[in-house]
Image (cartoon, rainbow, N blue to C red):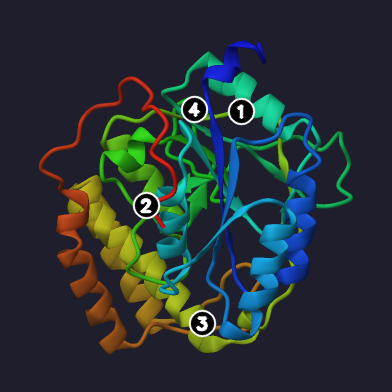
Amino acid sequence: MIAKSSQFNLSIALVTQNRPESLKRCLKSWRSQTISPFEIVVSDDSDEAYTAQIQAIAKQFYCFYTRGPRRGLYANRNHASLTCRGTHILSGDDDHTHPQDYVEKILEVIVTDPQRVWIFPERKPGQSIDTPLLCPPELHRSGCGCLPKDPSDCAAIADGSSVYPRQIFDQGLRYDETYPFGPMWYLWGKVLRKYGWRISFSDATFIWHHRQFEQRYLDTKHLESFWECTTYVQFARAWWVEPSLQNMIWSILYLLRRIIFTSTMLGYTVKTRIKLANAINLLKFAWRSKEKYVLKEVSPPGQCCKEKNPYPF
């Protein structure tokens, strides 16, 4: 199986921001693989105070370093993915580590169907090996996540452990960059389905997610922005990605609820509501997102694209 997978090149599109120690741990894991990835692209959205250190770490582990666009997480994911040269692109995060045969297992899965998006689960560090590996959630009517009915053909995305045929990006499909942070991955999964890409869950391997408590979990403004992004996702879906009266009604009901009542999100220790002015803005953003989601010409999934020319940067 590994011999057959040699026709595919797995690029790692790794995004990072202000976490040099976490990045070092992550890259050490990548460089301990039984099979090395084709390339590791480190797209750095860090503040200037961290830039030199991040660049040195990338060089230490023989990665291609590029400065990120500094417009938020999803702009950075787009930048990292577009920098990659391989036939397949794995979206990676700096707070992940991996089993030593992670790349090997992924290549074995790609061989079974190279024209699918493959998503892989996560475990917490120290979690029992007997803990079931669950499929990541897909978009629910609330704008949050729910388990897919059919994990082999779903709209779920594992934001830091999904593998994409590079044709997706060559088609012009992109993560939505409207908000710098928030559950845009739910919308991304729906967009890929809209344009004919099959998304399948595999439990052949997994990542360890070293989640840390961050100050944003105490920040009311950050939570409000998160809720705005969540609601934007609902309306963009209802208007352009999966347009239906039912989706629109649910979007309106949840927006009203978030304007009237305070609420929180898993991980946060604060509550907030969406301000009326911000609600109007997110509706404007969602309405204007038509140009992102109603593309005139997108070729259907086909043969894997060949390796790109060397780095353009």
Residue named by callout 3 = 222
The percent position of residue 24, horizontal first and vertical second, equals: 77, 61
Answer whether residue 140 is visible to the viewer in this image. Answer: no
Proximity of marks 4 and 3: CB atoms separated by less than 8 Å: no
Q: Amino acid at mark 4?
A: Asp
| Cβ–Cβ under 8 Å for marks 4 and 1 | no
The residue that mark 1 highlights is 202
Rendered position, 156 above or below 87: below
Label 2 and label 4: CA atoms lie apart by: 18 Å
Q: Is residue 237 left or right of residue 1?
A: left
Q: Are marks 2 and 4 in contact (CB under 8 Å)?
A: no
Q: Quadrant of the N terminus?
A: top right
Instruction: State the quadrant of the C terminus.
Output: bottom left
Amino acid on which the number 3 mark rests in the picture = His
Question: Would residue 10 be found to the left or right of residue 252 on screen?
Answer: right
Q: Secondary structure at mark 4?
A: loop
The circle drawn on residue 187 is 2
Helix, strand or loop at mark 1: loop
Q: Label 4 belongs to which residue? A: 150
Q: Residue furthest left?
A: 296
Residue, x 74% and y 58% (percent of image)?
60
